[in-house]
């Protein structure tokens, strides 16, 4: 068998960093074996680059280099790139000059990501407002996500960068690189306030703890009684 690398033949959703997955390739031909090039092909939805060719293409060829012991080695690092708007099932096929084939299967399970599990808002006065943001993304799906807060009187939502009309419920389809959600904390009474931001997809549910702290007349009155 000429292929020493890749050793793993299953590429999963979590292997990708943003829209790319990088893996080593090495094929060794013994001195008496055929010469030629190593061919690497990606299925629909993906493109490839190598150390020698950084232009994304569906096919890449790697030349074999003759070693002092007579063997020939094709060696490089391949980057698998998403060409569309989302990860999809697919494959990468490697074929050496002898006809030996290795197929890497791309298996995509939908994944939902939030970049924070706890948001603590800056202390504010009652009847004023402060803001925080959370980044939401998904891989392997282009599914609408329903966002809601458990305390709609104090915590409301809007998609950052758009018309900031705040609501306790928001439905978005996150972009491949992520969508920023702005959360408004507008306490109507002094005190500490806690709630949950819930992100619901057909395949997963994620939550973020929301923590706010409001000052005002009640805090001043409570403090003055103890002094």
Image (spheres, rainbow, N blue to C red):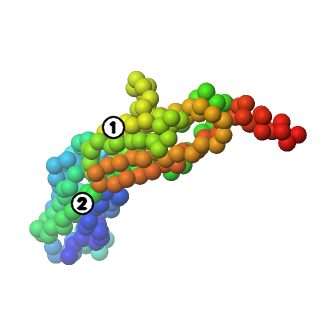
Residue 92 appears in the picture as rendered: no
Within the image, what quadrant is residue 220 found in? top right
Residue at x-position 26% and y-position 65%: 10
Q: Is residue 221 left or right of residue 75?
A: right
Q: Which residue is mark 2?
A: 107
Within the image, what quadrant is residue 31 found in? bottom left
x, y (%) of residue 198? 42, 47
Instruction: Using the image, tell me which numbered label, if any, was put on residue 58.
Output: none
Direction left: furthest residue: 99
Q: Which residue is mark 1?
A: 172
Q: Earlier in the sequence, mark 1 or mark 2?
A: 2
Q: Nearer the viewer, residue 72 or 154?
A: 154
Q: Secondary structure at mark 1?
A: strand
Residue 216, placed above or below residue 56: above
Q: Is residue 147 left or right of residue 226?
A: left
Direction right: furthest residue: 227
Residue at x-position 33% and y-position 43%: 145
Q: How many marks?
A: 2
Q: Is residue 8 left or right of residue 60?
A: right
């Amino acid at each position: 068998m000429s292929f020493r690398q890749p050793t793993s033949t299953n590429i999963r959703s979590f292997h990708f960093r943003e829209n790319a997955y990088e893996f080593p390739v090495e094929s060794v031909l013994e001195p008496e074996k055929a010469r030629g090039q190593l061919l690497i092909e990606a299925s629909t939805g993906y493109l490839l680059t190598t150390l020698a060719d950084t232009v994304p293409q569906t096919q890449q060829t790697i030349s074999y280099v003759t070693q002092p012991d007579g063997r020939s080695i094709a060696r490089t690092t391949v980057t698998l790139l998403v060409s569309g708007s989302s990860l999809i099932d697919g494959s990468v096929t490697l074929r050496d000059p002898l006809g030996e084939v290795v197929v890497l299967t791309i298996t995509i399970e939908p994944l939902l990501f939030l970049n924070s599990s706890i948001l603590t808002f800056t202390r504010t006065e009652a009847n004023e407002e402060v803001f925080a943001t959370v980044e939401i993304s998904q891989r392997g799906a282009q599914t609408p996500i329903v966002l809601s807060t458990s305390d709609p009187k104090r915590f409301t939502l809007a998609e950052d960068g758009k018309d900031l009309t705040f609501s306790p419920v928001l439905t978005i389809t996150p972009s491949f690189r992520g969508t920023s959600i702005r959360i408004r904390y507008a306490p109507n009474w002094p005190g500490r306030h806690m709630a949950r931001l819930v992100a619901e997809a057909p395949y997963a549910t994620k939550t973020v703890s929301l923590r706010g702290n409001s000052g005002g007349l009640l805090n001043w009155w409570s403090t003055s009684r103890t002094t």
